[in-house]
Image: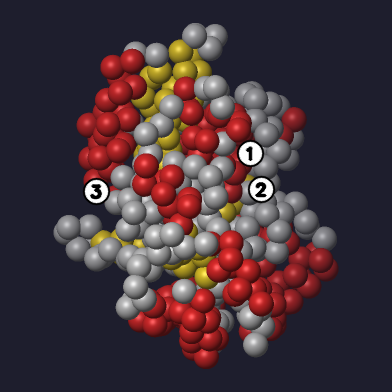
Amino acid sequence: MSIQFRDLQRQYGYIKDAIDMRISHIITSAHFISGPEVKELEQTLADYVNMKHCISCANGTDAISIALMASGIGEHGGGSRKDAVFVPDFTFFSSGECPATIGATPVFVDVLKTTYNIDASSLQSAVEKVIREGQLIPKAVVAVDLFGQPFDMEGIKAICEKYGLLLLEDAAQGFGGSCTDVSGNRHMACSIGDIATTSFFPAKPLGCYGDGGAIFTNDDNIALLCRSIAVHGKDTQNLDDPNAKYNNIRLGMNSRLDTLQAGVLLGKFPIFRDEELDKVNHVAELYSELLKDVPGLTIPVVKDGMYSSWAQYTIQLPEGSDRKSIQSRLKEDKIPTNIYYVKPMHLQGAFRGTRSAEADCPVTEKLCETVLCLPIHPYLEDSEVEFVAGKLKAVL
């Protein structure tokens, strides 16, 4: 038995007709940049997450940078004072890279051992420390929906409101997930923050066949700024004018979603919404049932009121396990595994010697030593899940 970590070939076989029809139409029309499919996709996704605006862009990394730039995050007074952007220490590099790239200072905070998402108490301590130091201006929080599960909405929002911080939801891995508040209202991922971003990288829950990303907001002005920044800072007052992109009123970037990628996403979306989310949750539940009694093994926790889109199924190996050996033995049985993430953000070489390297994140450091991600996707069959779980238990 040979298992794929994220089986995009099997998925394509299942939705081939819808994808091929969309791609064929776009190639025939030859409208490869800013074609009508881009606007159709933006409206479809905005409606799905119940947000007023969806602004597509070239990738999830650009989405974060554009969202921060449109929100006025960066440095002030010629660089004499920089904005502090609080970022979980256990996440993909772009969550911290983007604030730094636009002139802000990422301040890394610890995560919860159970959900892998940002820890409200660690965030509170980090904000208060920055205020005491007086060197940075507390400005924003990047709250990641890691591995598919939304962050602690109410806990993190309360801190943001207390200190007047922008809450940016990084839903690169969380699109399709949701959470329910204390009043029983359901909130889709990409609607939980003041502004939100996602990624359509092929391996994400909703992925295209290349790079892609999007920004979500209810603020009309922020939406216009995002659209301007994404196309070289074009004039936002005349967006429908074909010459607007030659009237550049601010510095921006070249970050458009290709029409072909929009077509792929439109072809995938109905199946993603109606079938794949339930299927991948079934796979995760079966894994958890099969692995729940393995001594020393920690399985993922989905908190009450949360619904995960399961970008990854991430376990924590028993204390003292030889992770490299376990991976090697599983590979012998053609079972692929990955490690997300091998190093805390604050220990990345790019931040060495900076304020960002000063972080107290013991949970993250421990997770980086013990986590292991197992194959998961909507098309994984029960027999394959049982095979992976059985081999893992045998190895342990």
Mark nearest the camera among 1 and 3 is 3
Residue visible at 38% across and 39% down in the picture: 361
Mark nearest the camera among 1 and 2 is 2
Specify the amino acid type for callout 2.
Ala
Q: Which residue does the numbered mark 1 point to in the structure image?
A: 230
Mark nearest the camera among 3 and 2 is 3
Foreground of the two, 293 or 139: 293
Name the mark on residue 58. 2
Q: Which residue does the numbered mark 3 point to in the structure image?
A: 154
Give the secondary structure at mark 1.
helix
Seen in the image, is 370 located left or right of residue 24?
left
Specify the amino acid type for callout 3.
Glu
Q: Are marks 1 and 2 in contact (CB under 8 Å)?
A: yes
Foreground of the two, 381 or 186: 381
* Rendered image quadrant of residue 115: bottom left
Residue visible at 63% across and 49% down in the picture: 59
Seen in the image, is 206 located left or right of residue 149?
right
Residue visible at 42% across and 35% down in the picture: 108
Position of 52 relative to 183 (above/below) = above
At which x and y percent is residue 371?
A: 47, 59
Name the mark on residue 206. none
